[in-house]
Amino acid sequence: MLKKPKNFALNFKILRSFIIPTILVSTPFFIKIQDVKGGIEFQWDQNTGYRRLKWFQKENKKHFKNTIYFFFRPIDRKADLLKVDLAIPQTFKTKIKKDNISLCKVNIGGFESRTRCLENIPADIEIKNDESSLTKMINIYPLSKIPANKDSFAIVLKAKNPKRSGLYQFHSYGQFAGKALSSYLGSWTIVID
């Protein structure tokens, strides 16, 4: 009589050793795997003077038409801005035209609203290729100064994403009212997949 319960217990242990690993191995194939967007940002400039600025782009895939908003929030401006310079890295290889660059008062989107321009600010735009520093500079001279109030402003760049994916770091410099030289405002790190 004792042999039957022992055989049943032994058979159950053998059966369990085959079923449980099979379930554990097959489970990941039934779970839908989605793209995970990590919250890691790489910085080239690790010094204390580096300032990370906010940005938004509509499309992050390579070789797609894209609209990038480079934000200047109230916290990013100490005083009224007379001039803004945007340094585009040389590795961001795409055609940039004056007609596709604008400066505007912006609504920064969130959970309940979209990012969009509220009011265009008339400005003179100049594009320079600087071979010595391997960057392309976009100089923006607004016809009226950008005030240091509670409004947010943005440089809007409409261009095709480069053919190569990667991280591209854009730097901004601005000339404040009452100052003769431009000073560093901050940087944006754009991701192209």
Image: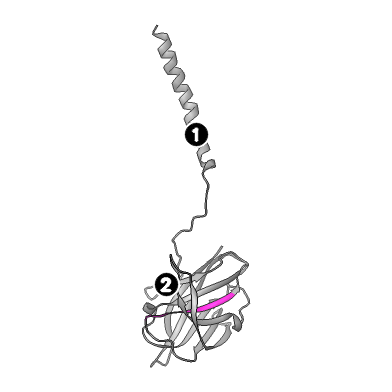
Which numbered disc covers residue 48? none
Find residue 177 and report its horizontal and vertical position in percent: 40, 91
Q: Quadrant of the C terminus?
A: bottom right
Give the SS element for disc 2.
loop
**In percent of the image, x 49 and y 55: which residue is there?**
36
Amino acid type at circle 1 is: Ile
Find residue 143 and report its horizontal and vertical position in percent: 49, 92
Distance between mark 2 and mark 1 Cα atoms:
46 Å
Examine the residues drawn in magenta and state their main secondary structure. strand
- Can residue 58 be seen from the camera position used here? yes
Magenta segment: 150-158
Badge 2 local density, few (<14 within 10 Å), some, or many (20+)?
A: some
- Can residue 170 be seen from the camera position used here? no
**In percent of the image, x 51 and y 36: which residue is there?**
25
Q: Which residue is mark 1?
A: 23
Asked if residue 166 lies in the magenta stretch, the reply is no
Which one is closest to the eye, mark 2 or mark 1?
1
Badge 1 local density, few (<14 within 10 Å), some, or many (20+)?
A: few
Q: Which residue is mark 2?
A: 52
**In percent of the image, x 41 and y 77: which residue is there?**
73
Find residue 186 and report its horizontal and vertical position in percent: 43, 77
Q: Is the residue 95 above or below the residue 62 in the image?
A: below
Give the SS element for disc 1.
helix
